[in-house]
Image (spheres, grey):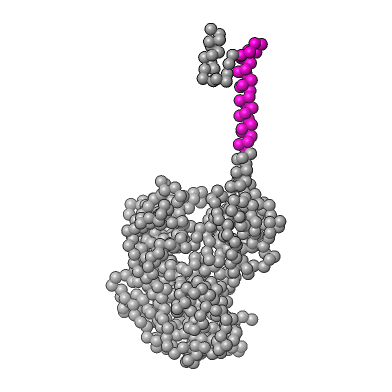
Amino acid sequence: MKDHRRKSLHKGDPDVGFAPKGRSYGGDRLRASSLCKLAVVFGCLVLSVLTFSAFRLFGVSVHPVLVTPWQQSRTLNSISAAASGNAADLPAVHLHHQIPSPIALRRAVSSPDLVLLFVTLNASSLNPISSSDLLCLYFPPSSSSPNLSLRPVSSDLNQGILRCPLQPPGHLVSVGISAASSAPRPILPLQWDLLVYESLLDSADNSTIVFAKGLNLRPGRLSDPSRYDCVFGWDLSRPRFLITSAAITAAQEVIRCETPLSVLRRMANASPKLPPIMVSIRDRGGRGAHPILPSVAIAAATTAHSVLPSGSFAGISKLRQSEHRHQMCICTMLRNQARSLAEWIIYHGQIGVGQWFIYDNNSDDEIEDELSKLSEYNITRRVWPWVKSQEAGFAHCAVMARGSCDWVGFIDVDEFLFLPSPELTLDKILTNYTVKTPEIAELRTTCHTFGPSGQRTAPPEGVTTGYTCRTAAPERHKSIVRPAALSTSLVNVVHHFHLRSGLRYVNIDRSTMVVNHYKYQAWEVFKEKFYRRVATYVVDWQDEENAGSKDRAPGLGTRPVEPPDWPSRFCEVRDKGLRDRVLRIFADPSTRRLPWQRS
């Protein structure tokens, strides 16, 4: 009976027989149990070692990346060796969550010559952080340690933006602090040309306007909005928790949607303890397996004065408009034009402009310092880091200006409105169209293009008095529009907008008003246009793309080499009208110096 039990216990195991004499079955069982325990412990140790190795190997990213030779950008080449560091010089960086970093990295976007880092400073940090404290960190694929650190190109930390030299191909990016031993985990930057990059809540109807690249909509044309949805949520990677709203209009890079009621409530009762609401676009036509575009856009109201009403939302009211209005405002987009701002703003302030909206496209020439010297003027600077987005920026500006401006002119900082007749003023012209012809919503003004006028260096007295020779034939026009009269699609081709039904434009006679465009200045100034333009159609003049664009100089091509006859080019008509007006109004009677001349 005893042997039978043993056989039944080992049934099915041919290698197990009866226990030999002198050894009990209970002892075998105990030893087997001990061996099993040892095997389990040994297996756990092996698994721990493998897990730790895997963590070291894939701690940064588990995505396989093809590493290609590093093609440095011009931004990187322009940075001195002293600003960079090799692996031996890098500070010890810890990526562990247990060591809190005084700065958080939210997102990163790679553009043609920069990588934009969107950061949040830790408000509880004992020591304030400045851009001089920061380092751009670059991590090779599948590495938990950076192999390169560079100083930022520029920053707007008050708006959460750090601009770093372009990362090597396949590298992840993070941000470090010179005196700190911790850094946020590195991330792979999003691509600038497939991205939802801005959004705002329109105060006119509480709709949401979304700005996106990668939709490939035709320029200057309306598109079918039925294939698009706006998507709202705290985490756009979790489709089950997203709210969608159908598009109302679609054109160029602008999609307009109804804003869901729950989003309006959340914006009206915003709390710093809750994450912001992200906005993106879903393409119903399908974008492979990922119909929702990557996004860095946060749901935002139009202006600081645009406050949603609290209480009942049964019938959403319009956002409160700004109480003080200006008859004339100006919107511009620029990069590294700080030296030109004083003349441009002081002159236009004298002729009747009440507010300036400056969309700054990644300037690194101390523009904030220059604007601080013009504090008596009503200037709003908005960081607009997006490439090839002038039309979108102007659409954004038109909505932002509508609450405080009756008319808005869209001109560059090298363009000056000039009224040839001393009897006319900007106020009289705009009042005439506002009162007598309210169906006129856009004034198209002819441009006169000025050349170097014999100047070999930038004239210290400024462009309006330094350049006095222009081409005979006028170029394209620039527009002054009523922002409240624009089509809800916000379609524009930089120099004019689509208007609402029943409204129209008028061409302003050249004897009434023109735009003096100081386009072709002394070579040392003009050559800067060869690199990193903000214009819509030409990013870099040395690229062959859009070689026939009017943004280029006729006959100059794509080589940044000064032609021997450059100072005398584009000179067909001597025109001193604005020069004489400026000297009469602004020149100091004793010194003849102008208020914007540098000492």
Which residue is depicted at the point 35% across and 69% down?
A: 221
Position above or below: 7 against 73: above
Q: In the image, residue 205 lies at what x, y percent?
A: 35, 61
Q: Is residue 448 magenta?
A: no
Which residue is depicted at the point 46% across and 57% down?
A: 295
Quadrant of the rendered image containing residue 445:
bottom left
Position above or below: 311 against 527: above
Q: In the image, residue 490 lies at what x, y percent?
A: 37, 67
Q: In the image, residue 173 lies at what x, y percent?
A: 58, 56
In the orientation shown, which residue stands out farthest toward the front? Answer: 14
Position above or below: 207 against 406: above
Q: Quadrant of the C terminus?
A: bottom right
- For this view, does 219 lie left or right of residue 464? left
Q: Which residues are magenta?
A: 19-48
Question: Residue 476 versus residue 149: which sits nearer the camera?
Answer: 149
Which residue is depicted at the point 52% across and 69% down?
A: 360
Q: In the image, residue 199 lies at what x, y percent?
A: 44, 60
Question: Residue 222 versus residue 383: which sits nearer the camera?
Answer: 222
